[in-house]
Image (cartoon, grey):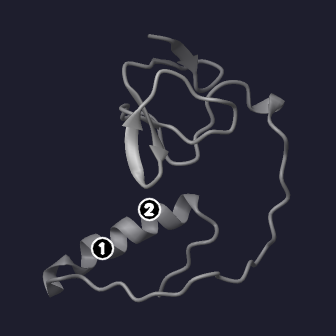
Amino acid sequence: RDVIRISEKEKIKITEMCVPTNGEIVPADHACPGEIVILADDTLKLNDILGNEKLLPHKTWIDNPMPLLRTTVEPQKPEQREALLNALAEIADTDPLLHFD
C-alpha cells in the first residue's frame, strides 16, 4: 500500500481504506482530492489533512454560524452521561459547527 505524509516529519502506511457511499462504508482502492476517507490508523484525528495542505483551496469560516439542526441527545443510563459529554467535547474540538450544553 501507499505511504502518505501527514506532517512535515510524519508518514503513515495505508493498509486499508474505506469511503462512505450511499449511507454505507465500503472498501476503496483510491480516493479523489477532497474526498472523505476512513483509514485504520490510531495517529489520525478528525479533520487531519493527508498530503500537501498548501495545495488545498482555503475556505473562509463564519465566526458564529447558526446551527442547521437541533436535537436532544441523552445517555441510555445516567452513569453514561460523563462518557457522552466527553465524546461530544472531543467532537466539538474539531467541528466548529457542533455546540452542546
Residue in the picture at 68% in, 38% down: 34
Residue in the picture at 58% in, 47% down: 47
Where 72 sits versus 46, above or below?
A: below
Mark 2 belongs to which amino acid? Glu
Mark 1 belongs to which amino acid? Leu
Where 10 sits versus 84, above or below?
A: above
Image-based side of 41 in relation to 36, left or right: left
**Crowd rating for badge 2 (residues with CA inside 10 Å; few <14, some 14–19, many 20+):** few
Quadrant housing residue 73? bottom left
Relative image position of residue 87 (x, y in whole percent) = 36, 66
Report the disc number at residue 84.
Answer: 1
Relative image position of residue 85 (x, y in whole percent) = 35, 75
Report the disc number at residue 90.
Answer: 2
Report the disc number at residue 12.
Answer: none
Image-based side of 45 in relation to 64, left or right: left
Quadrant housing residue 1? top left
Image-based side of 35 in relation to 100, left or right: right
Quadrant housing residue 40? top left
Q: Secondary structure at mark 2?
A: helix
Q: Secondary structure at mark 1?
A: helix
Q: Earlier in the sequence, mark 2 or mark 1?
A: 1
Depth check, front residue: 6 or 20:
20
Where 101 sits versus 55, above or below?
A: below
Residue in the picture at 49% in, 82% down: 100
Check the image and name the residue furthest to the front. 22
